[in-house]
Image (cartoon, rainbow, N blue to C red):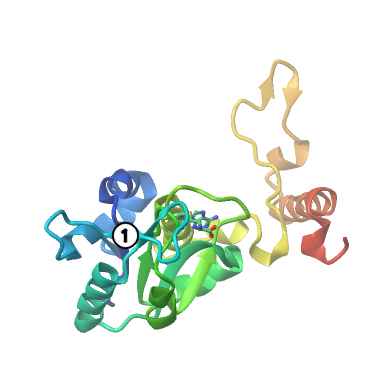
């Protein structure tokens, strides 16, 4: 069997991430050996007797800055064990995350994801260790844990074998630059609101055609930018 993908997440709030990876699809993916997720408590790498990982900003101003020392120690420890494809820092001034980036990252083997806190990390961490900076959108959160969880989730569900229906990820929104078509399940009639006839026809070619048309018109309506039409 080939090596599972590995994601190492560095955080000063490990508990926040533990539960996220302990459920549903992400839990199953780990249990079946398709991905290994390791969460590292940054405080374990602090040599300070109070296990501090932050300090006051040079030049003054509000907000603490995450120190380079524990982060450097943690990253170097990991890099001594294996080669990493990317060392990612979650940050609002990074490149906006999208499905294309998720697809690309799902083809890598080993990733480190660093979660920031407070005012962010010492700039030298970014210069010396970080190979990729990712934002999950134009808003500011209090920590990088949710962003790291979002990026990990988007990557892991793309790994072969993770979703039960192998083709399922391919028909999601943004693959092929189209939004997903509407979906229905039983009952076929809910208080007079019925399901489109074609879906009950059993005619696969017609169903696929209908889905494609729906995806196209939905994309045109909601996200013409994806079609280059805005
Ligand atoms: N002072 C920084 C914000 C720090 S927010 C600035 O203005 O750019 C604290 C931490 O939360 C960041 O270090 C980052 O790891 C995380 N974070 C907040 N918003 C984020 C976003 N939109 N995308 C990714 N990470 C984010």
Does the image show residue 41?
A: no
Residue 83, image quadrant: bottom left
Apparent side of residue 32 relative to residue 99 in the rendered image (left or right): left
Residue 172, image quadrant: bottom right
* Residue at 15% from the left image edge and 53% from the top image edge: 50
* Residue at 52% from the left image edge and 66% from the top image edge: 134
**The C terminus sits in image quarter:** bottom right
Of 217 and 88, the residue lying toward us: 88
| Secondary structure found at label 1 | strand
Of 198 and 137, the residue lying toward us: 137
* Residue at 79% from the left image edge and 48% from the top image edge: 222
Seen in the picture, residue 50 relative to 84 is either above or below; the reply is above
Neighbourhood count class around disc 1 (C-alpha, 10 Å): few under 14, some 14–19, many 20 upward: few
- Residue 36 location, x and y as percent? 27, 64
Outermost right residue: 229
Outermost top residue: 191
- Residue 147 location, x and y as percent? 47, 55
Q: Name the residue under label 1.
A: 55
- Residue 131 location, x and y as percent? 45, 79
Seen in the picture, residue 76 relative to 113 is either above or below; the reply is below
Does the image show residue 89?
A: yes
Of 55 and 97, the residue lying toward us: 55
**The N terminus sits in image quarter:** bottom left
- Residue 58 location, x and y as percent? 40, 66
Of 127 and 192, the residue lying toward us: 127
């Amino acid at each position: 069997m080939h090596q599972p993908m590995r994601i190492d997440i560095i955080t000063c709030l490990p508990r926040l991430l533990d539960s996220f990876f302990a459920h549903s699809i992400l839990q199953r993916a780990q249990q079946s050996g398709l991905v290994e997720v390791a969460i590292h408590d940054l405080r374990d790498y602090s040599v300070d007797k109070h296990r501090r990982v932050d300090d006051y900003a040079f030049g003054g101003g509000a907000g603490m800055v995450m120190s380079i020392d524990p982060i450097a120690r943690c990253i170097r420890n990991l890099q001594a064990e294996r080669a990493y494809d990317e060392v990612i820092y979650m940050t609002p001034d990074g490149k906006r995350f999208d499905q294309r980036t998720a697809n690309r990252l799902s083809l890598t083997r080993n990733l480190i994801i660093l979660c920031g806190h407070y005012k962010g990390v010492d700039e030298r961490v970014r210069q010396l260790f970080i190979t990729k900076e990712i934002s999950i959108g134009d808003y500011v959160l209090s920590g990088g844990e949710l962003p790291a969880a979002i990026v990990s989730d988007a990557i892991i569900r793309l790994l072969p074998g993770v979703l039960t229906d192998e083709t399922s990820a391919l028909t999601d929104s943004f693959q092929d630059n189209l939004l997903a078509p509407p979906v229905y399940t039983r009952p076929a009639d809910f208080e007079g609101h019925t399901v489109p006839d074609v879906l009950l026809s059993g005619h696969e070619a017609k169903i696929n055609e209908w889905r494609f048309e729906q995806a196209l018109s939905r994309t045109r309506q909601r996200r013409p930018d994806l079609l280059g039409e805005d």
